[in-house]
Image (cartoon, rainbow, N blue to C red):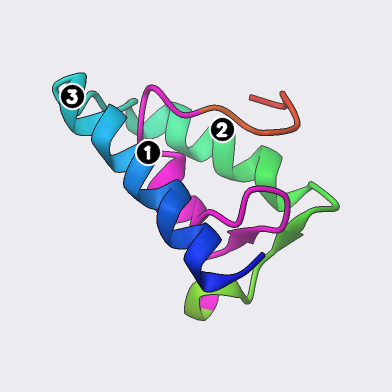
């Protein structure tokens, strides 16, 4: 995935997040999501300087897992 594609996806997610009032999940849900991502074959733990990257959607998982409106592209959470 190109940097332009990643930027476009991030802009769309950010717009939805802000438009919805910036709802976040709680710490327990963040941890649950990150555990699932960590076990996924599409997760690159070294991506985004060690914050973790999904190789399906190209997202930074430390950011995406916090946003209540976001979902896993593989429907794992």
Dot 3 or dot 2, earlier in sequence: 3
What element does badge 3 sit on? helix
Above or below, comparing residue 22 to residue 4 in the picture: above
The image position of residue 38, as x and y in percent, is 70, 52
Would residue 32 be found to the left or right of residue 41 on screen? left
In the rendered picture of this protein, how many numbered marks are placed on residues?
A: 3
Report crowding for label 2: few under 14, some 14 to 19, many 20 or more residues within 10 A (C-alpha).
few
- Pointer 1 residue: 13
Report crowding for label 1: few under 14, some 14 to 19, many 20 or more residues within 10 A (C-alpha).
some
Above or below, comparing residue 32 to residue 9 in the picture: above
Say which of 72 and 30 sits in front: 72
Give the overall secondary structure of the magenta segment.
loop
Mark 3 to mark 2 CA distance (whole Å): 25 Å
**Quick one: quadrant of the N terminus?**
bottom right
Determine the residue positioned at 28% across, 41% down: 14
Above or below, comparing residue 24 to residue 53 in the picture: above
**Quick one: quadrant of the C terminus?**
top right
Q: Are marks 3 and 2 in contact (CB under 8 Å)?
A: no
Mark 3 to mark 1 CA distance (whole Å): 10 Å
Determine the residue positioned at 49% across, 80% down: 49
Based on the displayed image, in which of its 4 quarters is residue 46 positioned? Answer: bottom right
Residue bounds of the magenta highlight: 50-70
- Pointer 3 residue: 19
Mark 2 to mark 1 CA distance (whole Å): 20 Å
The answer to whether residue 33 is magenta is: no
Dot 2 or dot 1, earlier in sequence: 1
Determine the residue positioned at 35% across, 33% down: 67
Residue 23 circle label: none
- Pointer 2 residue: 32
């Amino acid at each position: 995935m190109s940097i332009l594609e990643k930027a476009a996806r991030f802009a769309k997610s950010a717009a939805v997040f802000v438009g919805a009032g910036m709802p976040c999940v709680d710490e327990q849900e963040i941890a649950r999501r990150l555990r699932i991502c960590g076990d996924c074959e599409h997760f690159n733990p070294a991506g985004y300087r060690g914050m973790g990257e999904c190789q399906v959607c190209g997202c930074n998982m430390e950011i995406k897992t916090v946003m209540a409106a976001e979902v896993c592209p593989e429907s794992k959470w």
